Amino acid sequence: MTLGTPLSWPRIVEYLQYIKAHGIDQFIALYHRVKGRERDHLRWGDEIEYTIVKFDDEHKKVRVSLRAKDLLDALNLSPWRPEFAAYMVKGTPGTPYDDLMSYFNIVAYSMRLRYKSMCKLLRPNESLMSISFPALGAPDFTDPPAMPRPTHPDSVGRSVFYPDEAIYNGHPRFHNLVRNIRGRRGEKVAINVPIFRDQNTPSPFIETFEDAEASRAALPDHIYMDHMGFGMGLCCLQMTFHAVNEMEARWLYDQLTPITPIMVALSAATPIFRSYLSDVDSRWPIISASVDDRTPFERGLASSASDGYSKFNAIPKSRYDSTDCYIYPCSTQYNDIQLQYDEQLYQRLIAGRVDEHLARHIAHMFIRDPLHVCEERIEQDDQKSTEHFETIQSSNWMNMRFKPPPPDDPNIGWRVEFRPTEVQLTHFENAAYCCFLVLLTRMIVSNRLTFLIPISLVTENMQRAVRRDAISTQKLHFRKTLAHCWHTPDGKPCPEGHPPAEPEPEPYGNNVAEMSIDEIVNGNTDFPGLVPLMLQFLNSADVDVDTRCTVNQYLSFIQKRARGEIWTTAKWMREFVHHHSTYKKDSHVPDECIYDMMKTMDKISHGEHYEMLSCFKPKTERTELIRLLLAANPKRWICNDIMYDLFRFFDHAKLGLKLALISPRFNALVNKHFNGKSELTIWRSIEIRKEIEKRQATLFVRIGGANYKKFPLSDHLLHNKICFKDLHIEYIDHSVITFLRANQQIWDKGTTLQLDIEENFIIWHAFALRIWPMFAPNIRQLSFFDGHHLDCLRRHISQSILSDLNINSINSGRIFPDSIADDGPNATARQALSKWLHTPRSDRQPKQLTCCDSSEPPNINWITILREEFLRATTPSANYIIRFGYFEATPIEPFELMNERTKEMLTLTTEVNRCIVKRCQIGETIQWDDENSDNLSKIVFELNGNYIGQLSSPPAAGQMNEKVPLEINAGPSGQQKKK
């Protein structure tokens, strides 16, 4: 978003014609620069909007938390973006997914990982939810509290319900849009949503307002709203498809347009507004009205206009609504709406050699005026900038958007945005809808299918699709038989490799019928159904078994939802309200009901309940994948691979190389990216040992079973290798230290360090002096077997070593925390461990400690000590989780304790051979994070006095430049591994 001094609406009026004329010239210049681009391939990406909420457990109320700017500033990662509201954030994959179907296997993981990266910054009782908040505009709906100021001259919205503080304050664009929409319209927006009529709903339902404008605008039996935030403050799921060329983008734009109402009904998730049940299930009509800047003349309420800028009478739609025309040349036969467009600008486009169909689409968009203009950006170089074009293009919020390549990024081509889908509560649902649409685009392009219907019927379908329980109660206009296209725009046979064109349409009654969502998705006697067509397409495609299983689960879920077997989010919310004890069947949803509903939805979104999804759980819900993704390497090492860009929200991620370690199905991803540029080797587990015969350090690479390859150490040995899972170091000399320094980038963004070093002064002195400085800044997890390891670390390096390091998780072996937390000179290892455990992390996440007791019966005295220390505490501790393994010789009784002084609780739960202790604030939920505790890039030092070589002299000549493997044998020669 461009920075500058935003102009008020009266100031923008002075430049309207200038901005529009130069916007057209900018498009013409860009169009001729990029219209012939053919080198691109199909790529796609998603955008998911989230609401930050805060639960008030004491008063049973949930509010939106106005902390979006704080979170975005703290995260500072490009895949996260601000949205309209101060309680909203938007997450993207960072860069598009490629055209391999294997990407379907990681869509849900991408969503989950970016979600977790934001969740780590949340405060206690806050949650990040992919929902549209149902109590916007209700009394006291923000945290911190903010009051509307409908009569204050400095208020940008003048709303009766929605305070200015709820608008995102990190950029002036959003406040300026609110002010200028109101300024252009001449009054506040008027949003009237039909109320759901329950048995005790007043008839008529009429609200009274002190505000005169609200009293005039509010309709009987409707929920009234008066601010842009009631629409733009709701959340959605959007998808962008990167086409091969301009004509394919136009083709996809047209073919996906009739699909948009179907997705609105399938994804229905917004039935409650201002804490009232409505008679619609979608945000679409609300957001359309929330940005409706049409003047009375443009709405057909006045016969003339005196404002100087209203040129078109009775514009039928808001600037946020369904599209009014197809743009692929042969598709335009279905444009049965009398299109309003700026004739002067249309002729300018035609003179600029833009074809009539695209020119009409652009000129139609330009009947709208720019709403956000910066004073410093009025004068532009039309050959280099598209800012004036984009200021109008980007504020035409239609169900589909056709996007030319930007002038300053040659890697981005012609795109289309699919915009109407309601955001879903779970990653699984959002991933399912994404993959459904991606498969649909591939099927359309590959099989030359057409779903075109008259554009007026798309408008009618959108109106039907938003109605309550549209899946079960509504029928939409759709093609009743399968149709293929085999002609180019000029009527010639379509050659291979080019997008198809639509032949002359059959008479209306022969090719369009009213069909239920179930029939459109699953088929009937005439139409095979979208999902059966996709399954047929997959049968003919080269799809590996694992990807096919992933896709089948997503499509099965879509089919069940279309049949009504799995409720939409909107229906689930309605049923929850109807069965809640506080609901009086009067259409008003009480605060406690919304609180309980949001609590349940939060648990569903975190995977604690699957009641909304029936039997569906993510097939690939494996901690191995997430652990591997987090065990990533820095950006500057190896290459800018495709998966690094995909998961850019981890600034240290280098994931493309790592993915090959998960499963053979990901090899295609790596091969696709490198495209033969270099030969890479996958090394899973490597060891550095002393080779007795050659009396030098040698690197052993496990290649399966007990088989190894041997390599002499080289400072460049790892630079073209896929990262290892474990590095075991059992010998150190000068060459080993040189090798580690040369490859330090492997762990410079976080690693697990495991120590098994005997209590020997010489070894520890060498370790502390030569090795520790390389690892210390980047240790995130520490593992040791016994207390003497911690004692030696404190003795040879620092007494407060655990506090000095940024360690999130410790595996302390056989030592347990003490009741005294101290890391002073006289403190024991247990006391130092306790000091670390009780010191909060910088990101407010729980400390994680793993212990193990192999004695029989287990020694559980430390648990008693922990309980007593908790009950005596007068100040809060850090949140922590302790996992304690033991043999079940003696049962351990679970407990739950409360400390009213510190407002904390301490709980113990048991599993097979393990118990879990948690300490946190009362009412807070904390979970063990396997992604932090099981980092697969692990470095193990396993040393005793016989495994220290010469540390002062350089390695032998030629030792550090040999890169050829020496041999393959059944195991490492020389000294056997210490048991």
Image (cartoon, grey):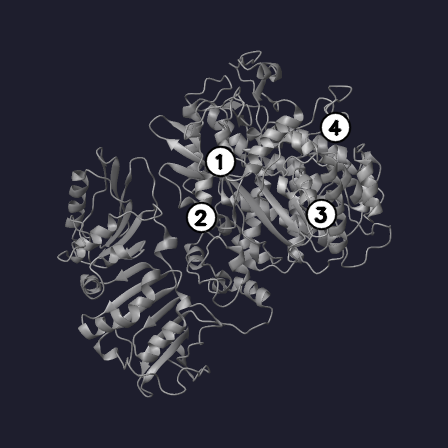
Badge 2 marks a residue whose secondary structure is helix
Q: Name the residue under label 3.
A: 252
Q: Name the residue under label 2.
A: 75
Q: Mark 4 points at which residue?
A: 315
The alpha-carbon separation of the residues under discs 4 and 3 comes to 26 Å
Q: Residues within 10 Å of mark 1 (few under 14, many from 20)?
A: many
| Residue 839, horizontal then vertical, whole percent | 26, 48
154 to 887, vertically: above or below? above
User: What is the three-letter code of the residue carrying label 3?
Assistant: Leu
User: What is the three-letter code of the residue carrying label 2?
Assistant: Leu
748 to 191, vertically: above or below? below
Closer to the camera: disc 4 or disc 3?
4
Badge 1 marks a residue whose secondary structure is loop
Q: Name the residue under label 1.
A: 86
**Residue nearest the observer in this picture, 757 or 552:** 757
- In the image, which disc is placed on residue 358? none
The alpha-carbon separation of the residues under discs 1 and 4 comes to 32 Å
User: What is the three-letter code of the residue carrying label 4?
Assistant: Ile
Q: In which quarter of the image is residue 805?
A: bottom left
- Looking at marks 1 and 2 on the same chain, the residue that comes earlier in the sequence is marked by 2
Horizontally, residue 386 falls left or right of residue 881, namely right
